[in-house]
Image: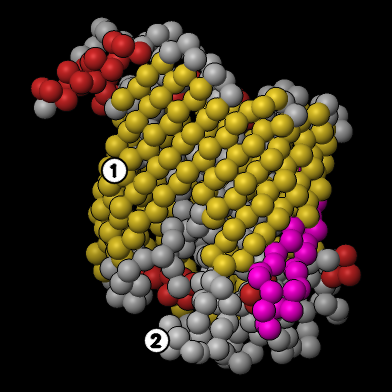
Amino acid sequence: MRYLRVTFFILAFLFAKETISQIHYQPYSYEQYQRHMQQVYPDSLTHTAVKPFVGANIDTRHAITQPDTANSWWYRKLFNEHLIEVAKDDHTFYLDFMPDFIIGGERGTNSKTLWTNTRGAQAGLSVNKKFSLYVSFYENQGRFASFIDSTAQRNGNLPGQGFSKNLRTAEYDWMNATANMSYHFSDAVQVAVAYDKLHIGEGYRSVLVSDNPYNFTHARVSGTVGRWQYHSIWAYMNDLRNPRLADVNDPFSTRLGEGIKYGAFQYVDYLASDKVSIGLFHSLIWAQNNQRTGGKTNGGLGLNAKFQPWKKYIFYGQLYADDISKFGFGSSSNHRTAFQLGGKTYDLFGVANLNVTAEYNQAAPYTYQHPNNRINYTSNGEALAHPRGANFREALGMATYRWNRWEVYGQTMFARYGLDPTDTRNVGIDLFKEEITEDGFRIGQGSQNNLFYNELRVSYVMNPKYNLRWEVGLIDRRNKNTVSGDYHHATVFTFGLRSSFRRFQQEY
């Protein structure tokens, strides 16, 4: 251990200098971005729709600074600094160990012990205010709540986290990684290559592209010219439902697909004024030519808007349609439209770091589906937009508060959605079904379910550099099928030592 300390000291001595304003990759989770709304949403609007950000740190606590020699090496590494950090005039670098050790329990309809054992690492490099590189890797084992088990078995992977061994036994063993490399040629041209999530919009959810599915490989070209900002994103995505062979044990079986699909997402944002921004979105999904696809593509159109009438108050909305002919509202015709309305504010009632969001989302039946499910609006077996898929209404609210190193997170959500009564029927929620079997297009059709979800977490942040924290959490989830009367209730308690800025959506 002595040699380890000496090594770190030599690195710090050789490379440490003044704080340098480099560009940095900002790992995305809505909760962490919401905690810093004052930096994300200044008095006049800026372009903030496409996430994760690569730029100046939105939280000054994450900046790499001169070592605080008044405290011991152990104290600094545990409470204030990255495990390894380097700051020079032309570059910065950091490296961290990322643990996630959680124990807990589920009570209600099902009862069981829950746990997570994660060991990970992250590293970040910035060079000459032009180049940014971020990588992270996690090795995980865990046992989750029953409602996560059912979603994992339906999707064929852990929601938002990728493929896992032991999927049917519900004692998961999986790994996941993130990588993002970007180069800033000029304000007009930035290029990034990533294996990462993507989120377009100002809300917790997105009906355009959200951080719901697991990471996928993509390249992004973006830039700002005057009041305009553009993003051109080209993606290579896994297609778990259409593997290369129908029967992996029979090399001569009929081909269903290649196990991959492609996506192109174009987004242009315009600052109409210091208070209003409007963005146009277009998506295209396709797969390699074979007998099933026939060379077809699946396109979608969207609108993203943001309005900041007063300081600290932001209102936002989104609209998505499979195509122009499917745009509209009502249950009498085949309108395949989704939309979002929301608002958020920071420092509510003059209380510093008290930030609040309220949001409504809905998607009509069959939105995001396609007659050929190889090119539906999914990645890695999960919805590219809202995790519910379609045929739902949802209202949610959340609040975050920070005092010194104490943080509180609260969320409440209500959703009404319709499930397929039988495997042969398609009421519009399962994005992998191809043929419409119903005459109506009413939201909630089929076996209607009501879902109530409430969550509270309290954390003490030991080290803000990599979000090392002690955390206790409580979830109360109640779901009732109003047709069959089936009722499922789960109360989940968790406690653990956690790190990283990632968070996986589980309100489904």
Say which amino acid is labelled 2: Asn
Between discs 2 and 1, the one toward the N terminus? 1
> Is 309 on the left-hand or right-hand side of 76?
right
Q: Are marks 2 and 1 in contact (CB under 8 Å)?
A: no
Q: Nearer the viewer, residue 395 or 284?
A: 284
Which residue is denoted by mark 2 in the rendering? 249
Which residue is denoted by mark 1 in the rendering? 99
User: What percent of the width, then of the height, locates residue 40?
Assistant: 63, 30
Q: Residue at x 83, y 77 (%)?
A: 334
Q: Residue 399, can we see it?
A: no
Above or below, 269 relative to 482: above
Magenta stretch, residue numbers:
283-305
Could you say which disc has been placed on residue 172 in the image? none
Q: Nearer the viewer, mark 2 or mark 1?
A: 2
Say which amino acid is labelled 1: Pro
Asked if the stretch drawn in magenta spans residue 20, the answer is no
Q: Residue 24, can we see it?
A: yes
Under circle 1, the secondary element is strand
Question: Which quarter shows the N terminus?
Answer: top left
Q: Residue at x 51, y 54 (%)?
A: 215
Q: Residue at x 78, y 55 (%)?
A: 282
Above or below, 221 relative to 291: above
> Is 186 on the left-hand or right-hand side of 122?
right
> Is 299 on the left-hand or right-hand side of 468?
right
User: What percent of the width, then of the height, locates residue 222?
Assistant: 71, 37
User: What percent of the width, then of the height, locates residue 178?
Assistant: 45, 46
Q: Nearer the viewer, residue 77 or 403?
A: 77
Q: Nearer the viewer, residue 72 or 481?
A: 72
Q: Quadrant of residue 97?
A: top left
- Badge 1 crowding class, 10 Å Cα cut-off, few under 14, some 14 to 19, many 20 or more, is many
User: What percent of the width, then of the height, locates residue 501?
Assistant: 44, 40
